[in-house]
Each structure stands twice: as C-alpha cells, then as structure tokens.
Amino acid sequence: MRLLVVEDDAELAGSLRKSLETAGFAVDTAGNGVDGEFLGDQEPYDAVVLDLGLPDRSGLEVLGHWRGRGNAVPVLILTARDAWHEKVQGFQAGADDYLGKPFHVEELLARLNALLRRASGRAGGALQVNGLSLDEERQAVSTDGGRRVELTGTEFRLLRYFMLHPQSILSKSRLSEHVYDYDSDKDSNVIEVYVRRLRQKLGESVIETRRGQGYVLGKPD
Amino acid sequence: MRSIETRLNLGLGLSLILVFIAVGVGVSLSIRLLTEEYVSSRLEHDAESLLTAISFNGDGVHLSGRRVNTIYNRVYSGHYYRVQVDGRVIRSRSLWDRNLKVPAVAVGQVRRLREAGPQSQLLLVRAAAYRKAGHAVRIAVAEDLTPIKADMRRFQLRYALFSLGALVVLLLMQRFVLRAGLAPLARTRAQIGELERGERQQLGEDIPRELLPVVREINRLLLALQQRLQRSRNALGNLAHALKTPLTLIGQAADSRELDGHPEVQRQLQHHVEVVRTLMERELKRARLAGAAPAGGQVQLDREVQALMGVLHRLYDEKGLAMEARVPEGASFPADKEDILELLGNLMDNACKWARGRMRITVALEAGLQISVEDDGPGRSETEIAELTRRGVRIDEHGAPGHGLGLAIVRDVVSYYGGELTLGRSAELGGFRVDVHLPLPSQAP
C-alpha cells in the first residue's frame, strides 16, 4: 500500500512517514499544495493524507482539483482546522475521512486501514482471503491450519496489496508502484523475489502466475 | 419621544391657526376703519348740505326742507341730525321724540363718537360747529352702523369657515408631503428588521441626504463587525494550526518507543497534552463564536443538517447507524452559519458516538428555533442529568469523554444566543436526549 502525505510541517511529515512505514506503508511526502497535487495525479497512490493549511495551494483546492479531474484516490484530511463547517467543506470537496489535530498515530492508522478496506469494497475486521488472515498490527499472517507466519516489511506490504485485490491479475509494475515509495528503485524483478518468498512461507499455490500478465492471489470461488 | 410627523403636524397646525386669527383680526379692523371713514365722509357731506339749507330771516332761523335728504324725514330711519343755532334746536323728523346727545364743540372743531340710538341702534355721530352769518351753528349728523355691523359679522363668519377649510386642506397636504418625505425612513426601518432577521447585510443608501451619514455609519459598523469577526476567526484558525501541529509532535514523542522504559513520564506527558488539547479546543472554539449579531445571515437548516448527516455517515461508516432528520423543508433561522453548524455538529456527533444503532435530529421553528437530538445509547443517569442541569457545571470538567467537550461548546453557543439547553432521556429511543431552544434575535434577552 502506497500513501502520499501532504503536510507542510517537515517535522510532523517526517514523524508521520516513520510511523506509517513502520505500519507497513510505502510513503511519499510533499511539503506544499502544488507538489502534493502533482504527485497525487502522477502516482497511483492507494490513499492520501492531506493537510488543509498548506503553502502555495490550500488542501481544499488540491482536493477539488483532483476530484474535478476524476482522480478518486481515497483522501483522509488531517488538519488543525476541525470546526464543523470546515469538516462539511472538506467532505463536500470530496474527502473520505477527516481527522483533527492533535491525533494519535493509532487512530490515524485505524482510519487509514478502514479507508483502504472501504476503497477496495471490503467490510471491517481482519483482512481474510482464501483462509489467510492478515494481522495488520503485528504484520503477520495466519493460515488455514492456524499456523502463524511472521512477515518482513516488504512481504507484508506485498501480501496486503494482494489480499486487498483478491482474484485480480496484478502486474509486476503495478505491484511495485504500490509497494514502494517514489524514491525507491522500482526494479520490478525484485517483486519476483518477494513473490517467491511469500510462496515459500505460505505454500506454492497461494499466488498463481499468469504468464505475461502478472500474478493472482486466490482462485475464483 | 413623539414621532416627527406628530410634531410637525402640531407645529404647522398651531402656526396656521395663529396666522389665520391675526389676518382675521387685521382685516376686520381695517374694514371697520374704512367703513367708518366712508360713513363719516358722507355725514360731513350731509352736514354741509344742512349748513347751506339754513337761512336767517329777522331773528328766526329757517331750515329749508327741500335741500335735505328725505331719509331724515322717515322715523327711526337710522339717519338723524340735530342743528343748534344760538340756543334754538332743530332736530330731524326721523328722531321723532328722541334727542341726540351731542358733545360741546367749539367753532371749527369736529368730533366723532359712537352713541346708542333709538331702537337699540348704534350710531356714529359727527358733531361740528360752524359760523354762518354771524351765528354759531352746531350741526350733529348721525348714521346707524347696525347694518354695517351685520355685514361685518357675515364676513367674519365666511372668513372663519374658509380658514378652517384651508387649515384642513393644508394639514392634509402636509401629511401627504411628510409621508412621502419620510417614506425612505420607513424603508430604512423595514431594512433594519431584515438586518435583524439576517436577510440582508447592509442598509440601502438610497435615502435623503440628511440621513445618509447615519446609514453610512451603521453600514460601516456592520462591515467592521463582519470583518473583525472574519479576521479574528482567521487568526484563531492560524493559531490553532500553529499550536496543534507541535502538540501532535509532543503527543507522538510521549507515545514513542524511547520512553517505553519510563511509564510515569509517558503518562504525565500524555495527560498534559490531553489537558492542553481540551483547553485549546474549548477556548478556540468559544472565541470563534459570533453570537447573536445583526446581519449575521440566514442559516438554511434543512441544507446544513443534510450536509452534516453526509459528514457523519462517512465518519461513522463502520457503525452502520440509522440516522433520521426531521427538518421542515426550507426552514431557516437568522444566526451565524458557523455557530449553528458547530452546535448541530457537536450534538449530532455526540449522539452518533454513543448511539448503538439510531440517531435522530428534530428541528422545529416554534418561537425561535427548537432542536432536539436523541440516540439509543446508554444515556445519562437521572442524578448526572440533574447535576448537570442544576449547577450548569462545565461539562468538560466532568471528564466524560465524548459528551464532554462537545456539550461544553453547545452550551457556549446556546448562551451566546440567549437560548436554553435541556438534557434528559429520550422517551422513544431510550438514550441521551438534548433539547436546545434559541429565541429569535429580536426576542433574545
């Protein structure tokens, strides 16, 4: 899962990036509205954390522009401006969730996870596909037989993306776009390595290869 | 103070009455003077005729009747004379048995006076003394003024009636002119009503020059009020933004792994961050409130409630609440939109937070604005409600998260608008129920 954090306070942006990366997200940051809007249009983010009080271009404008161009990326507004009329404006501009500052990282993570799940059309609770149950907090997965498998950061991010898009053919480039941040070396061959590791941990049949197309998690029911 | 119209009508009415009376008196006096002069000149003429008609033969005096107007021969005709020559008196036949009292006059002297005549006539008497053929001749001629008096009274009556008519017409005209002249004032008064109801932001400046400075000043003050509110809201927004980001960082530092070994420090930090956050939220939000002020605008209640429902549906998506809004279509209330959104948002948010499955908001426009928000959550015990209601305690000090801060802000909004807040239990849904009544601005205490 790849996130964009648009926040003008460099310290808060850094701390958010760290917390979110620890939670298993690939994170890009932008320090002003113009850069944020550009990145949001260019990169296929799974969600955006957007401040409203941004230099150069306000968060509401950025959001309005995205929505105007049909960019439906889920947006969580994270702002100090949390009067009710501001919340109404935020949602009317197309926000999906709203969190006032100051906030606890746990609450932000819970809301982001709910947002991502909602965006992929899933109900709440632990993410479960084909007998696999993902523990997002501990970055581990349980199998059918109740076996518990610990995952590294990249493995976790990859598996979560698969589990949020079950029965879909996911190309290597798409996977790398959603698993790595902007500054990483997006060598799609690395995806092969991580898919192989997941198969080693969870069994060969868990991820199917479609030659020339990509990978699929879970067989159609 | 009496209305300008009454004062002007009274002033004009009184001065017109004075003018008409003065003119009436002046005209009457002049007419009387003129007629007396006219009568008197006729009397002089008659006296001269009498003087010519007198002749002396021997020791006798003779008055030739042919040379005297016949009116002096008809009894009590109103025209009389009395001629006295050396102790002999000749009276006109018209005097019959009456005499004419004549004051003593020296030769060459003329006197004029009024005297009661026969048959209650009022006579103007002209007495003069001449010398003719060595004799002193005193001639008094009199004429009855009564017919002239009657003419005079007729004239005065006609004049009074005409004056009265003119007075009425002039007062009506003044009323019409005043109404037309004061129409802009009535318009301004109506606009002030609209201002109070939030239907307009400024007064119209299409009014007489005399009042323009007042209206301009009011408009300037209204604008200044709006701008000041906007400026202070912006400043508070910036302050909140500037303070909350560092506060977030402090909170995150408190939660960080590095402090895991110091649970006491961690707990204290977290506690103080929470205290600062609560105080800041409360005070900043309170400072942002506009309160009941003129030209605050109209809040479209149905639209705003719908917007808030949209927000809450998103925020409480996972709870799958059934939210119900009973708002009359097109309902609006004169108040600041941000204030009302803050009031409704906090009430509805609290209800959603505590609701198990249902939240309901009911809005009615009865003697102001009536809002009630109910949920099917646990509610509050009777004792808690009684205490909150009786003492009007600052609810945030009671430490109940969720209902606390939100209700405190609701209480602020309600008190800024001179309204009433009632807490209780929802009869239908079983949970907490909050009733808010805001009076219309013109009825606010």
Image (cartoon, coloured by chain):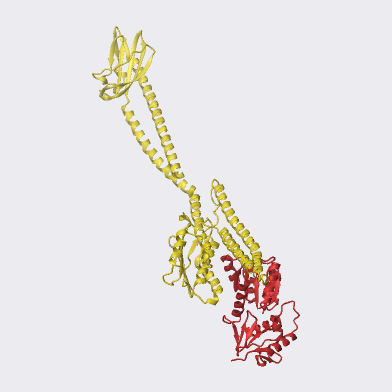
What x and y, as percent, mark residue A38?
70, 73
Task: Decide which of A45, B215 is in the foreground and name it.
Answer: A45
| Residue B393 visible in the displayed image | yes
Point out the residue furthest to the left here. Answer: B97
Residue A211: name its quadrant.
Answer: bottom right
Q: Is residue A52 above or below residue B140?
A: below
**Residue A165 in sight:** no
Residue, x 47% and y 55% (percent of image)? B444
Q: Is residue A142 left or right of residue B75?
A: right
Residue A220 in the image: x percent, y percent?
60, 91
Answer left or right for B30 relative to B401. Answer: left
Tell me residue B423's x, y (percent): 45, 64
**Residue closer to the observer: B101 or B56:** B101
Q: Which of B55 and B186 is in front in this view?
A: B186
Instruction: Residue B273: give x, y in percent of width and height.
Output: 62, 64
Picture quadrant where residue A94 is located: bottom right
Q: What residue is drawn where x is 45% and y is 47%?
A: B176
Q: In which quarter of the image is residue B269?
A: bottom right
Chain B as rendered: colour: yellow
Shown in red, the chain is: A
Give the vertical position of B305 relative to B201 (above or below).
below
